[in-house]
Amino acid sequence: MEMVDLGETGLKVSRLGMGGAEFHRHDDLNTAATVGSVLNAALDQGINLLDTAACYPKNEDLIGETVSHRRDEYVLATKCGHLVGLETGDDWTPETITASVDRSLRALRTDRVDILQLHSCGLAELQRGDVIEAVTRVQEQGKTRFVGYSGDNEAALWAVESGLFDTLQTSFNVVDQQARIKLFGAAKSRGIGIIIKRPVANGAW
């Protein structure tokens, strides 16, 4: 498996990563047996970047259940910001982010993630600043090594140009080329690591 530098983070990641979104979209895949089989096979083949999110139902729990015993073998990225999995609050508040991260760590059965990403909040939330301050505090507490933004279009460009994020996760595939045109050059020039999501456009074709 080809290994590459993830921007200027110092992380070495496999060219191909493993995303968790598809598991929760299909009930027959969202089981410990299936997730464990897929993730362990991926790790055995040299894939070392696992990406999930607090709002992928059960996914963090299943990662924790099936591969947390191999924690030192993979770079772990998750996302935060949505209220999913929490009892009270609102999306995109510092309180929700803090509670979401703590819940994620318990589910993933680890004391830290490698990359914590704000999960597709809009430009207004980014510009308000408090959500960025919240993930920065999480980083200062040692619960994540790096902070990233996961999203597209004008919010993604703002995140890149702000200089506040170590990584950008954004959509790029044969039918969606906007990131290549508007984001990749700006991110590369700032040493921001790029993670591609929706590489097959969620199977659109």
Image (cartoon, rainbow, N blue to C red):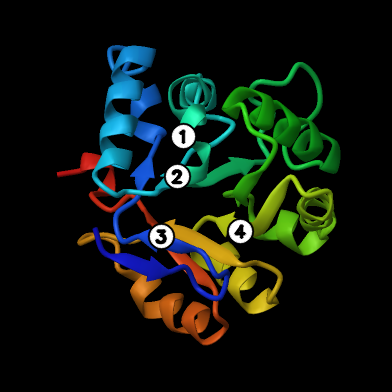
Q: What is the three-letter code of the residue carrying label 2?
A: Glu
Mark 1 vs 2: CB contact within 8 A: yes
**Which residue type carries mark 4?**
Gly
Residue bearing the label numbered 2: 73
Determine contact: label 4, label 2, CB under 8 Å: no
Q: Which residue is mark 3?
A: 13
Dividing the picture into quadrants, the one containing residue 86 is top right
Q: Nearer the viewer, residue 194 or 185?
A: 194
Mark 2 is surrounded, within 10 Å at the Cα level, by few (under 14), some (14 to 19) or many (20 or more) other residues, namely some
**If you read the primary sequence from the N terminus, does the residue marked by circle 1 or circle 3 appear first?**
3
**How far is mark 1 from mark 2, CA to CA?**
6 Å
Q: Secondary structure at mark 3?
A: strand
| Mark 3 closeness class: few <14, some 14–19, many ≥20 residues within 10 Å | many
Q: Amino acid at mark 3?
A: Val
Q: Which residue is mark 1?
A: 70
Identified at 47% across, 68% down, the residue is 6
- Spatial CA span between label 4 and label 3: 15 Å
Q: In the image, is 33 to the left or to the right of 96?
A: left
